[in-house]
Image (cartoon, rainbow, N blue to C red):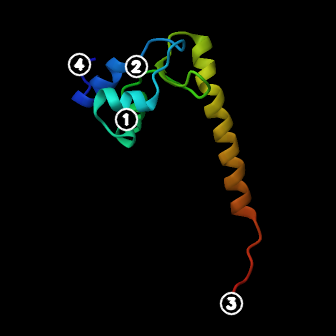
Amino acid sequence: MEHLDKDEKAIYDLLPKGIDRPRPLKELEKLSGLKSREVRGIIYRLIVLHHVPIGARYKHPNGYYIITNDDERKQALAPLTSQIAMMSKRAQVIGNVELENKE
């Protein structure tokens, strides 16, 4: 992946292939010397700009990994899809709720 910058390449190289041994954010921070916000930003760029299929596992063992098959893809998409639905419902309610007149 020669089109990645130095930090993107470092994080990419630290990500395991497959869901079996995902690498936690804290470990990525420690190994890369970057802060958590920077690591999350790099993961976002790897996915969105460079089309790297990175999944996140939220139950133990938790962490990030490179998706290698359709089952891993489904497992990575499930929490994202759920979060989108919850946020959409929340936005809908906030947009439609009656506001109190505080004058």
- Neighbour class for label 3 at 10 Å: few (<14), some, many (≥20)? few
> Earlier along the polypeptide chain: callout 1 or callout 2?
2
Provide the residue designation for mark 4. Answer: 2
Give the residue type at disc 2. Answer: Leu
Q: Is residue 63 above or below residue 66?
A: below
* Neighbour tally class for label 2: few under 14, some 14-19, many 20 plus, Cα within 10 Å: some
Residue at point 60% right, 23% down? 60
Nearest to the observer: residue 17 or residue 47 = 17
> N-terminal of the two: label 3 or label 1?
1
Query: Which image quarter: residue 100?
Result: bottom right
- Identify the amino acid type marked 3: Glu
For badge 1, the amino acid type reads Val
Residue at the image position 67 percent from the left and 54 percent from the top: 91
**Cα distance, mark 4 to mark 3?**
60 Å
Circle nearer the N terminus (4, 2): 4
Choose the circle earlier in sequence order: 2 or 3. Answer: 2
Q: Residue at x 65, y 39 (%)?
A: 83
Residue 49 in sight in this render: no
Residue identifier under label 1:
39
Q: Position of residue 38 (x, y in %)?
A: 34, 40
Between circles 4 and 2, the one closer to the viewer is 2
- The answer to whether residue 91 of the structure is visible from this angle is yes
Relative height, residue 14 to residue 45 (above, below): above
Q: Residue at x 40, y 27 (%)?
A: 27
Q: Tell me the quarter of the picture where residue 12 sits.
A: top left
Mark 4 or mark 3: name the one nearer the start of the chain: 4
